Image: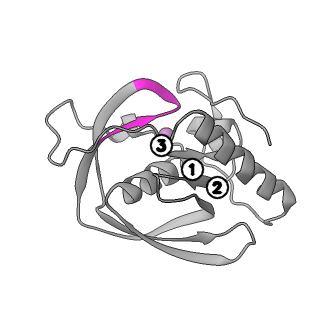
Amino acid sequence: MAIYNIEKAGESTVLREKAKPVKEVNDTIRTLLDDMAETMYAAEGVGLAAPQVGISRRIIVVDVGEGLIELINPVLLKGRGKQVGDEGCLSVPGYYAPVERYKTVYIEGLDRDGKKVSIKAKDFPAVALQHEIDHLDGILFIDKAKKPSKAEETEEAETE
Ligand code: NI
């Protein structure tokens, strides 16, 4: 197990790249998943994407307190409804802003054994998943943040 340094916006080019799909889920990928989870927990974040540790691959981990979700090559198939809540990001330390997201999302990806998994998530878990998938396309929450204003549906800010 290893804890990675987390790349910071403005200092990292990988954070702004479109990450490459994982071709084969092997032990290297499983070790990366373990290290990403350890890094996320050590930083007290609720999500982490591989580009945040300098690795341009489509891999995310999320744990909003309901257990660890690991996804390889995740795809947002469908989103429904809207929610707005304050977001933060381990790559954008100290900054929080409201972002509009889908309320409910349907996501597909691969698990650590390379098996296809489908996930339906709503409310805050859906926010975290959308935030992390954005990282795989080089998108940061500050790109989507609304101008500071009163959030329509305020969530306690957590760092992803
Ligand atoms: Ni983030």
Q: Main secondary structure of the magenta part?
A: strand
Q: Which residue is mark 3?
A: 139
Among numbered discs 2 and 3, the one appearing first in the sequence: 2
Residue drawn at 44 percent across, 37 percent down: 159
SS at badge 3: loop
Residue drawn at 51 percent across, 39 percent down: 45
**For the residues bearing labels 1 and 2, Cβ distance under 8 angstroms:** yes
**For the residues bearing labels 1 and 3, Cβ distance under 8 angstroms:** no
Quarter of the view holding residue 86: top left
On the rendered structure, is 13 left or right of 122? right
Amino acid beneath label 3: Ile
SS at badge 1: helix
Q: Which residue is mark 2?
A: 58
Check mark 2 vs ligand 1: CB closer than 8 Å? yes or no.
no
Q: Which residue is mark 1?
A: 136
Amino acid beneath label 2: Arg
Q: Is residue 50 above or below residue 74?
A: above
Q: Which residues are magenta?
A: 86-94
Disc 3: CA contacts within 10 A as few (<14), some (14-19) or many (>=20):
some
Gap in angstroms between the C-alphas marked 2 and 3: 13 Å
Residue drawn at 57 percent across, 45 percent down: 48
Residue drawn at 47 percent across, 53 percent down: 65
Estimate the x, y position of residue 134 in percent, counting from the top left: 48, 50
SS at badge 2: loop
Gap in angstroms between the C-alphas marked 1 and 3: 7 Å
Quarter of the view holding residue 51: top right
Check mark 1 vs ligand 1: CB closer than 8 Å? yes or no.
no
Check mark 3 vs ligand 1: CB closer than 8 Å? yes or no.
no
Q: Is residue 94 above or below residue 61?
A: above
Gap in angstroms between the C-alphas marked 1 and 2: 6 Å
